[in-house]
């Protein structure tokens, strides 16, 4: 079984560049006076946005794929050409709102095993939960102070992706978890919600330090 194909690697590269461009209008690298003398500010913003946003999306999808492969499904990662195209178009016209589906994973026959499919669906939001906590830890550890801005944005993006994907209806992951294993869904919702609420209260006590 091939863990990742050459086409998936190409798709991930395209996804990274596209996400960097799409979000470069909202996420920009902190600048000093000398930066304004450099001719490549736009490219720097694309790299900076990609560095922050791409891991949130890529690890979300790879988590789906990894769990699918673990269960023996033929899980394949795809970029959404229409979704990325919409995102690029919205960025090009400088839309103040960006909403699109950048990628997805297909898992053959997963739907025939609802409980396994529920775990597979939960894996994506779980990856965002992990990245949220890692970003938080990196900030509070104060080991990389020059990257604080990136960590602050990363924790926010991963938190919102987690919340968005746990919506229990439509095409969201939460709907698939709920349909496959309602006990798992509500357990995760309650425990995760309590942990995030506690962490956000703690964060308010530290936020002014950054």
Image (cartoon, grey):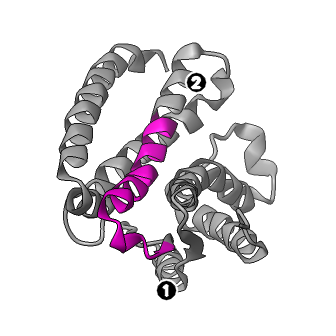
The number of numbered badges drawn on the structure is 2
Q: Can residue 12 be seen in this view?
A: yes
The answer to whether the residues at label 1 and label 2 have Cβ atoms under 8 Å apart is: no
Q: Which residue is at the front of the view, 39 or 102?
A: 102
Q: In this view, does 148 lie to the left or right of 166?
A: right
Query: Where residue 35 sits in the image (x, y, percent)?
Result: 75, 45
Residue 4 in magenta stretch: no
Residue 108 in magenta stretch: yes
Which element type, helix, strand or loop, lies under badge 1? helix
Q: In this view, does 59 lie to the left or right of 90?
A: right
Is 168 placed above or below 153 here? below
Is 66 placed above or below 154 here? below
At 58% from the left and 38% from the top, the residue drawn is 150
Q: Is residue 25 visible?
A: no
Q: Which residue is at the front of the view, 29 or 189?
A: 189
Q: Which residue is at the front of the view, 21 or 81?
A: 81
Query: Where residue 14 sits in the image (x, y, percent)?
Result: 69, 72
Q: What residue sits right under mark 1 in the picture?
A: 82
Among numbered discs 1 and 2, the one appearing first in the sequence: 1
User: Residue 208, which numbered label?
Assistant: none
Is 54 placed above or below 96 here? above
Query: Where residue 77 sits in the image (x, y, percent)?
Result: 58, 71
Which element type, helix, strand or loop, lies under badge 2? helix
Q: Give the range drawn in magenta.
A: 106-132
Q: What residue sits right under mark 2 in the picture?
A: 138
Q: Distance between the residues labelled 1 and 2?
A: 35 Å
At 52% from the left and 22% from the top, the residue drawn is 137
Question: Label 1 neighbourhood size at 10 Å, few (<14), some (14-19), many (20+)?
Answer: few
Task: State whether the magenta stretch is mostly helix, strand or loop.
Answer: helix
Query: Where residue 194 sits in the image (x, y, percent)?
Result: 23, 27
At 78% from the left and 40% from the top, the residue drawn is 34
């Amino acid at each position: 079984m091939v863990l990742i194909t050459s086409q998936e690697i190409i798709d991930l590269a395209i996804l990274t560049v596209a996400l960097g461009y799409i979000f470069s209008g909202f996420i920009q690298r902190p600048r000093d006076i000398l930066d304004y003398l450099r001719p490549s500010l736009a490219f720097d913003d694309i790299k900076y946005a990609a560095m922050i946003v791409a891991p949130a999306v890529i690890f979300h999808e790879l988590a789906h794929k990894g769990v699918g492969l673990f269960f023996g499904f033929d899980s394949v990662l795809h970029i959404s050409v229409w979704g990325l195209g919409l995102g690029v178009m919205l960025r090009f016209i400088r839309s103040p709102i960006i909403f699109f589906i950048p990628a997805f994973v297909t898992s053959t026959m997963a739907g025939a095993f609802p409980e396994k499919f529920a775990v597979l669906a939960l894996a994506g939001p779980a990856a965002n939960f992990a990245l949220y906590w890692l970003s938080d830890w990196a900030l509070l550890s104060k080991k990389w102070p020059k990257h604080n801005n990136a960590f602050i944005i990363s924790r926010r993006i991963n938190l919102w992706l987690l919340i968005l994907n746990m919506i229990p209806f439509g095409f969201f992951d939460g709907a698939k978890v709920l349909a496959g294993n309602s006990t798992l869904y509500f357990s995760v919702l309650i425990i995760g919600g309590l942990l995030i609420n506690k962490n956000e209260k703690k964060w308010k006590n530290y936020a002014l330090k950054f």
